[in-house]
Image (tube, helix red, strand yellow):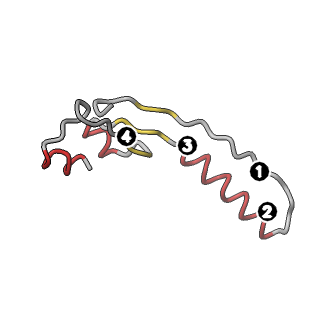
Amino acid sequence: VLEACNELGIAIPDDIALIGNDDILAARIAGLSTLSSPQYAMGKVAMQIVLNELDDLDVDVDHKFQFELVIRNST
């Protein structure tokens, strides 16, 4: 999207605001604002849900995660 905006002469963030997801290295290098997700915690909960299903357990697993909005040059 950054490349397409550049090719079309669309200025970020003057003409359009842009935000990414997961705060990957490329976003950091490009100055892209992102929503950073707690990947380890989400994977741990997902695995617990799978294990509970395999063991036929009817146990609720906490699904609350803390996300962080990382503001950079694209918003």
| In-front residue for pair 12/31 | 12
Residue kind at label 2, given as amino acid type: Asn
Mark-to-mark CA distance, 2 and 1: 9 Å
* Residue that label 4 marks: 19
**Which SS class for mark 3?**
loop
Q: Residues within 10 Å of mark 4 (few under 14, many from 20)?
A: some
Locate the C terminus by quadrant: top left
Question: Which of the marked residues, 3 or 4, is nearer the chain's N terminus?
Answer: 4
Q: From the top left corner, tell me how far across and down residue 71 is, in percent.
A: 38, 29
Mark-to-mark CA distance, 1 and 3: 16 Å
Contact between marks 4 and 2 (CB within 8 A): the answer is no
Q: At 46% from the left edge and 39% from the top edge, which residue is drawn?
A: 35
In the rendered structure, find residue 52 and report the number of the disc placed on it: 2
Question: Which of the marked residues, 4 or 2, is nearer the chain's N terminus?
Answer: 4
Mark-to-mark CA distance, 1 and 4: 30 Å
Question: Which of the marked residues, 1 or 4, is nearer the chain's N terminus?
Answer: 4
* Residue that label 3 marks: 38
**Which SS class for mark 4?**
strand
Q: Residues within 10 Å of mark 3 (few under 14, many from 20)?
A: few
* Residue that label 1 marks: 61
Q: Residues within 10 Å of mark 2 (few under 14, many from 20)?
A: some
| In-front residue for pair 58/25 | 58
The correct choice, above or below, for 40 with respect to 55 in the image is: above
